[in-house]
Amino acid sequence: MLTETDLDALLAGFKQEAFRFELRDRYNSVVGAEPYRRWAAGEPDDYAWNRSWMEKITADVAAGKAWRRVRIVSVPVSDYTRYGIAVARLSIQAGEDIRYLDRATAKGLGLAPYDDGNPHLGLHLTGTGGACAPVEEVERLHGPLTLHYRPGVAASEVG
């Protein structure tokens, strides 16, 4: 199983671009559980839990690396999606390019995982504390993967 810590270590080594294609309406991250609870309760958050990640994105962007993400969302959006949008402003301020596409439009466009010969890390987040099932198991059980890390691929080369 790939943990959130393992994913952080893997993403530390990309050369040009990290691209995330997110299809789920909710990710049950261990790191994000308490911040989501506070947000849902209307409590303030200083985002200290996210600071090192934002510093990493800022440093990567300053070094010429790109962070890009596309989130496919259901409409109407859930509370969790609204939370994700609220927290995404931090990533955007740090330099990440985040785009949203409603699920119906994405389905109409035939969006599917990429098979272009470039290395991919396909993750299926299990919803049980941020652990990820092995890719082979996900493909066997669920078919298409839900998140892609694509090193060295320019946005203009995608789709």
Image (cartoon, rainbow, N blue to C red):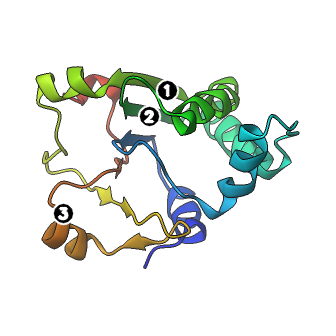
Q: Position of residue 5 (x, y in %)?
A: 60, 69
**Closer mark to the observer between disc 2 and disc 3:** 3
* Residue shown at the point (26%, 70%) measured from the top left: 135
- Looking at the image, residue 22 sits to the left or right of residue 11; the answer is left
The dot on residue 42 is none
Q: CA distance from mark 2 to mark 3?
A: 22 Å
Residue at mark 1: 98
First reached walking from the N terminus: tag 3 or tag 1: 1
Q: CA distance from mark 3 to mark 1?
A: 26 Å
Q: In the picture, residue 62 is in which quadrant?
A: top right
Q: Amino acid at mark 2?
A: Arg
Pointer 2 with pointer 3, Cβ within 8 A: no
What crowding class fits label 3: few (fewer than 14 Cα within 10 Å), some (14-19), or many (20 or more)?
few
* Residue shown at the point (66%, 28%) measured from the top left: 86
| 62 vs 140: above or below | above
Q: Amino acid at mark 3?
A: His
Q: CA distance from mark 1 to mark 2?
A: 5 Å
Q: In front: 59, or 68?
A: 68
First reached walking from the N terminus: tag 2 or tag 3: 2
* Residue shown at the point (88%, 39%) measured from the top left: 46
- Looking at the image, residue 5 sits to the left or right of residue 106; the answer is right
Q: Position of residue 80 (x, y in %)?
A: 55, 39
Pointer 1 with pointer 2, Cβ within 8 A: yes
Which secondary structure, mark 1? strand
Q: Amino acid at mark 1?
A: Ile
| 157 vs 7: above or below | above
Residue at mark 2: 69
The dot on residue 142 is 3
Q: In front: 76, or 2?
A: 76
Q: Quadrant of the N terminus?
A: bottom left
Q: Position of residue 57 (x, y in %)?
A: 64, 40
